[in-house]
Amino acid sequence: MVNKRGIFITGTDTGVGKTIVTATIARLLKNRGINVGVMKPVTSGCIEKDGRLVSEDAELLAWAAGTPPDDACAPYCLRTPIAPSVAAAREGTRIDFARIREAYGCLAERHDYLLVEGAGGLMVPLSGGLLIADLIAALNLPLLVVARPNLGTINHAVLTCYSAKQLGIKVSGVIVNSYPDQPDMTEEYAPHLIDSLSGAPLLGIFPRIVASDPREMVADLAERLDREATTRILLREIGVNDL
């Protein structure tokens, strides 16, 4: 049975803004009084602080949710900014799904709802022949797909949703992120075609926010979402209303 107390967020590509979207949803839930937890199971390209590697993505998620960015929030922090499986091999680390499941279980005991952000897209390798898709299946979570608005996004979004369904993963919906105020011809029709062709509902179009501080961006987006009537559909489809 799919775990309705959480959702896994993946992207159609690298750099589509998964972390911003995940943090924004976390902030929105926190502002609504929901005890939300966050997790970034594997992060490559981590920075060093006080002698230890730190996931900046996990730190942003934890800030948005109002929770501490502890080891359960970010079980695997890798220094090299490349595919996690390769980074782990270079650094002498083996990514163990059992450890990730254990961390997820610890977070599930502390929180009513969990947001889990992946690394890159659905087919990113994590360990040996295991992919992000295998981790989603191991955690038994439904999927939320984050897509970009520009040329190529329809193909990437439809492929991601199709592949997930072929692997038995429930796709709750798609969010188009960083949508411009003045879309060009491609950006104008992309959300509609993703909605009609992906086999998953379009749950949101997040506007492009220009800000130097990602926390400012997340706070702004969360406030905007809180005012939109369609946000209730997003929350319903990701299972928040079942709490």
Image (cartoon, rainbow, N blue to C red):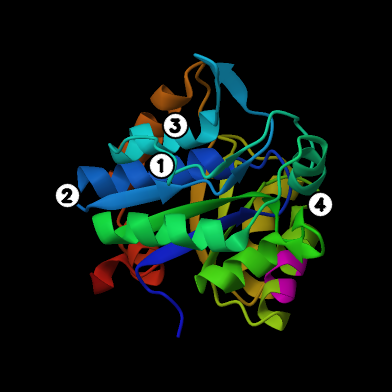
* Marks 1 & 2, CB-CB < 8 Å contact: no
- Magenta residue span: 159-163
For marks 4 and 2 on the same chain, the one whose residue lies earlier in the sequence: 2
Residue 82 vertical position relative to residue 99 in the rendered view, above or below: above
Image coordinates for residue 70, horizontal then vertical, percent:
39, 37
Q: Which mark is residue 33?
A: 2
State yes or no: residue 132 in magenta.
no
Label 4 element class: loop
In the image, residue 78 sits, relative to residue 177, either above or below, namely above
Q: Residues within 10 Å of mark 4 (few under 14, many from 20)?
A: few
Label 3 neighbour load within 10 Å: few <14, some 14-19, many 20+: many
Q: Which residue is mark 4?
A: 152
Mark found first going from the N terminus, 2 or 3: 2
Q: Please state which of the two labelled residues, at mark 1 or mark 3, is closer to the viewer.
A: 3
Q: Is residue 193 visible?
A: no
- In the visual, does 166 lie left or right of 4? right
Question: Is residue 235 among what the camera can see?
Answer: yes
Query: Which of the pair 204/80 is nearer the observer?
Result: 80
Disc nearer the start of the sequence (1/3)? 1
Q: Amino acid at mark 1?
A: Thr
The answer to which quarter of the image holds residue 114 is bottom left
The residue under label 4 is which amino acid type? Gly
Label 2 is placed on what type of residue? Gly
Q: Residue at x 68, y 36 (%)?
A: 44
Which tag, 1 or 4, sits closer to the chain's start? Answer: 1
Question: Residue 21: x percent and y percent?
Answer: 49, 44
The residue singled out by tag 1 in the image is 24
